[in-house]
Amino acid sequence: MSITPAKTPFFVRWDSYDNYLQIRIKNQFIESVARETTEQDPDRLELIPEFRTRNPQIEAIGMMLLAELQQQNSGNGLYIDSLANILTVNLLRQTVTKKLWQI
């Protein structure tokens, strides 16, 4: 798993065949969830870039999102929204640091 904050350059090359699931979360959504779940100012939080790390919870949520999107069931919007919230809360808990300064 890799976590790349918005506007951060990222390039990877594989030497062999591999599968990956890319999940993009809008900054506004992360900020909204941060406002609801933390006592910190979302403008003072920053995702920590990570490369080739493991997080079983995020992996499981990602696979649940993929499975739900592939099923295309009617009424799955609430389920997908709930998973997106859970994924974002997990990211905020595991991969966020406070900015010591702001530009």
Image: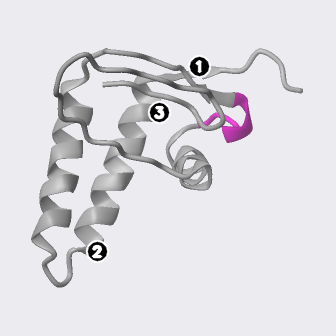
Q: Residue at x 31, y 15 (%)?
A: 53
* Residue in the image at 66% along x and 21% along y: 98
Viewed as shown, does residue 40 lie left or right of 77?
right
Disc 3 residue crowd, few under 14, some 14–19, many 20+, Cα 10 Å: many
Q: Distance between the residues labelled 3 and 2?
A: 22 Å
Distance from Cα at disc 3 to Cα at disc 1: 9 Å
Give the labeled residue for mark 2: 77
* Label 2 packing within 10 angstroms: few (<14), some (14-19), many (20+): few
Residue 66 at x, y percent in the picture = 19, 54
The amino acid pointed to by label 2 is Gly
Dot in front, 3 or 2:
2
| Residue type, mark 3 in image | Leu
Which residue is the extreme one toward the bottom?
Answer: 74
Local SS, label 1:
strand
Q: What element carries label 2?
A: helix
Residue 70 position (above or below residue 39): below
Q: Quadrant of the C terminus?
A: top right
What's drawn in magenta, residue-wise?
A: 39-44
The answer to the question of whether label 3 and label 2 lie on touching residues, with beta carbons closer than 8 A, is: no
Is label 3 in a helix, a strand or a loop?
Answer: helix
Residue shown at 51% from the left, 50% from the top:
33
Q: Mark 3 points at which residue?
A: 92
What colour-coding does the image apply? one colour
The tag earlier along the polypeptide, 1 or 2, is 2
Of pointers 3 and 1, the one earlier in the residue sequence:
3
Determine contact: label 1, label 2, CB under 8 Å. Answer: no
Number of numbered discs visible in the structure rendering: 3
Q: Name the residue tied to disc 1.
A: 97
Of the numbered discs 3 and 2, the one sitting upstream in the chain is 2
| Residue 72 position by quadrant | bottom left
